[in-house]
Amino acid sequence: MRVAVRRERIMTFSLMQEVESRGHEQLVVFHYPEVGLKAFVAVHNSVLGPALGGCRLRNYQNENEAIEDVLRLSEGMTYKSAIAGMPLGGGKACIWIDPHFTEKRRELFNQFGKCVESLSGRYVTAEDMGTTEQDVAWVKEHTRFATGVSREEGGAGDPSPWTAKGVVQAIRAGAEARFGTTALTGKTVSVQGVGHVGRYIVEQLCELGASVIVTDSYEETLRSVVNDFGVKAVSTDEIYDVEADIYCPCAIGQTVNKDTLPRLKCSVIAGAANNQLSDSSMYDMIEDRGLLYLPDFAINSGGVISVGAELNDSGWNESWVTEKVNAIFDTTHLIIAESEKRKRFSEEVAIQLAKERIEEARSR
C-alpha cells in the first residue's frame, strides 16, 4: 500500500518536470526537526545577480504545495527584479510551519541562517509573508546573505511600506489608463488581506481619498484596520462580490481564478499578492470581461527595491529607493502601452520585457 501511494504522488507531481519547465537553476530542501525547520529554497535565475527573495512562512497542506509555491514565487522574483531594473536574480524560501509559532522561533531562524550561508551567496533572503525584522535579524546572526534588517542596524527595515507605495503608484497609473485620471477620490477599492503590506496600502488609499472596503482571515488584524482607518469590512468570501472600481488582492496567491473571476465587479485588478492568477487560462477570461490587469510582480517590486538597495556599494539610501519605487508608475504605463502595441496580455508583456533584459545581460 505504501508503495502504491508513493507511486501515485510521483505520478501527480513531477519535480524535475516542474524545475525544467520553469527554468530553475537550483532547488534545495533543508530539514532540521530539532528546531522545527522544513525549508525549501529555490534559485530561479542568477544572470543579473544573486537571487534575492523573501522567506515566507506558511502551513502548507503537503510538500507538493510547498514546492510549487517556492518555484512559482522564485520565478516571479526573477521577473520582478529584472523589470524593476535591479542587478538581482530571483529566489525564494518557503518554510513549512504555522506563521504564528513562538516555540524555538529564534533557534529556527538561526538554523535557517546557517542554511542560507551554506549556499555561498547564490541566494539572499529577506522578510516576507509571516516573517519580521526580528526574524531576519536572527537569520543574519549566522549569514552575510540577509537583507531587510532594521534601520538602526543600517538596513532597509521593513519592506512592507515600500511594497505598498509601489502598488499605490501602479493603482494611480491604472486609474489614469482606465478612468482618465490618477485621482482616487470617489473611487472604491476592495482590499483582500490587510496584513503588513495591505495595511499600508489601505492607509495610503485613504489619504488619497479612496473609499476602501477590506477583508482578512484574521479577525484581530481586520478589526485593527477598521478601527484605525474607518473603512468597511466584509467577510473573506464576500470580498469577491463587492462593487468596486479596483480589486486589490494582498493575501495569498491564486485568488483570481475560474470561480472568483466571474464574481468580481471591478474595472482594474492591481494588488500586492504574488501569483494572483491561478494560471494562464485567466488571460482570456480577464480580457473577455474587459478588465485591466496590472501584473503583480511588476507593481509589488517596491519591497525588493528597498531591501536590494542594501547590496548597493553605497548601502541603503532613502532618496534612491524613493525615486526607484516611484518609477513603478511609469513602468506600469509602459506595460499597459506595450500590451496594447503587441496585442498581448499585460502579464505576458511584462514577463517578456523582463526576459529581454536578462537576455541582454546574458549576451554581454
Image: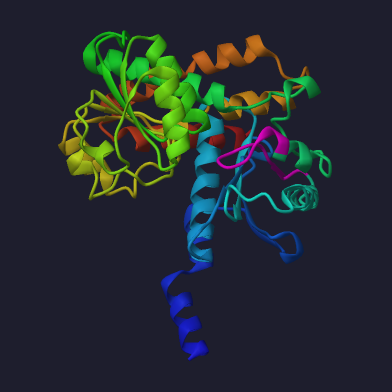
> Could you say which is closer to the camera, residue 154 or residue 198?
198
Q: How is the image coloured?
A: rainbow
> Could you say which is closer to the camera, residue 287 or residue 9?
9
Based on the displayed image, in which of its 4 quarters is residue 154 positioned? top right
Q: Residue at x 18, y 41 (%)?
A: 263
Q: Is residue 263 magenta?
A: no
Q: Residue at x 24, y 10 (%)?
A: 180
Horizontal and vertical percent for residue 329? 43, 16
Q: Residue furthest bottom?
A: 1
Q: Is any part of residue 272 visible from this angle?
A: no
Q: Is residue 127 magenta?
A: yes
Q: Residue furthest right?
A: 142
User: Vertical placement of 66 versus 220: above or below?
Assistant: below
Name the quarter where the C terminus is drawn: top right
User: Vertical placement of 292 versus 125: above or below?
Assistant: above
Q: Residue at x 72, y 49 (%)?
A: 105
Residue 227 located left or right of residue 266: right
- Our reading of the magenta stretch's main secondary structure is loop
Q: Residue at x 48, y 76 (%)?
A: 10
Based on the displayed image, in which of its 4 quarters is residue 184 positioned? top left
> Could you say which is closer to the camera, residue 260 or residue 278?
260
User: Vertical placement of 239 versus 163: above or below?
Assistant: below
The segment highlighted magenta reads 121-134
Give the mark count: 0
Residue 226 located left or right of residue 36: left
Horizontal and vertical percent for residue 1? 48, 91
Based on the displayed image, in which of its 4 quarters is residue 149 positioned? top right
Q: Is any part of residue 226 visible from this angle?
A: yes
Horizontal and vertical percent for residue 217? 41, 43
